[in-house]
Amino acid sequence: METINFAEIAERLGDEDKARELAERLRWPSGPVCPRCGAVEAYKLTPKPTSKRPVRPGVYKCKACRRQFSVSVGTVFEDSHIPLRKWMMAIYLMCSSKKGMSAHQLHRSLGVTYRSAWFMAHRIRYAMKDKSGGPLAGMLEADETYVGGKPRRHPSKRAGRSQRDIQRESYQNKVPVFGVLERGGRVRAMPIKGISKMRVIKALTENVDTERSTLVTDESPLYGDVKVMIPHRTVKHAETYVTGDGIHTQGIENFWSLLKRALIGTYHHVGVDYLDQYVDEAAFKYNTRKLSDGERFASALQNSRGRLTWFFAEAQGESPAAP
């Protein structure tokens, strides 16, 4: 995988042709692949000497399905009016920022409108989504955390209510996020509204190889029925955080701290309808923590296939699906 830093990115992205060549090299290291049928036999269109019709740079034609395509077709930046070089810079900036980069910062750095920067950021987070589908296996840690819903601190908001009532209201306003971490490997996390034993078991069934894994959790009653599907070890946090035989949930709790530092320190306010996008970004950065910034950038670019359907639903006046 190619290693590249931001100075080289800026130098290589002097114009659209250089940006397109870099995108083609990173997305198609073995040559162009048709995004419509998957064929690898394609040729680049060039204008004929006798033709008066111009040919757009970077357009290929598939020999199998006979359709034209470019490096942006089938990706998160298809049909975008924003120059490709700015897309590439935005991907690098978001991949190299450990705690995330706000849309306002992208807006100032790239010279695009705030609305465009917000749209780009969410599309890039979609490119960071784990599309591998392979189950987690080995020694696993599972835990849940709760995002948002801080207690009311202004005296007028606290009048006539006990501290217990205030804490209960804060807890009810939070959104649960469930996660599973593979010791020394990957993490997967997802917001789950109305978290329960059945929904936890469903999430484990979809993301874990139960036959080749051992699950470690805290003493929460959410995991009381997990032992029927997977070997289960528990650490009682009221007594200790790490047992003598290495049973703990420190890894997943470390991931929660990174996620919350990004949400609190960089983004400040995240709508519940978009929380899963920010969780995917945090998981991508954790899963690529051993890569350099340039390798992480290349990984996100190679994973940029697909479109965001909920943006089109919003444009038609429909609300996006809640996580």
Image (cartoon, rainbow, N blue to C red):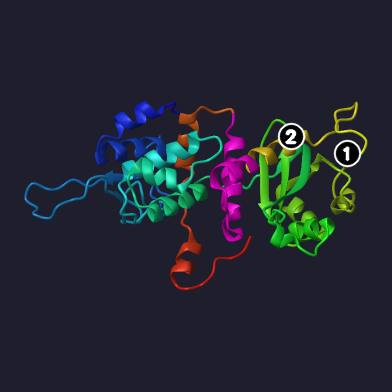
* Observer-nearest of 51 and 184: 184
The disc labelled 1 sits on which kind of residue?
His
Residues under labels 2 and 1: Cα distance?
Answer: 14 Å
Q: Residue furthest left?
A: 50
Q: Residues within 10 Å of mark 1 (few under 14, many from 20)?
A: few
Q: Quadrant of residue 149?
A: bottom right
Q: Quadrant of residue 152?
A: bottom right
* SS at badge 2: helix
User: Which residue lies at the image location 34% right of the left edge and 35% below the top edge?
Assistant: 22
> Where's residue 87, x and y in %?
37, 44
The disc labelled 2 sits on which kind of residue?
Gly
* Left or right, 69 with reference to 178: left
Q: Quadrant of residue 255?
A: top right
User: Which residue lies at the image location 55% right of the left edge and 66% below the top edge?
Assistant: 320
> Where's residue 119, x and y in %?
43, 54
Q: How many marks?
A: 2
Q: Which residue is mark 2?
A: 251
Taking the magenta stretch, the answer to whether it contains residue 275 is yes
> Where's residue 184, x and y in %?
70, 30
* Observer-nearest of 77 and 146: 146
User: Which residue lies at the image location 73% right of the left edge and 54% below the top edge?
Assistant: 203
Provide the residue span drawn in magenta: 260-289
Q: Which residue is mark 1?
A: 237
Which label sits on residue 213? none
Tell me: residue 196, above or below residue 146. below
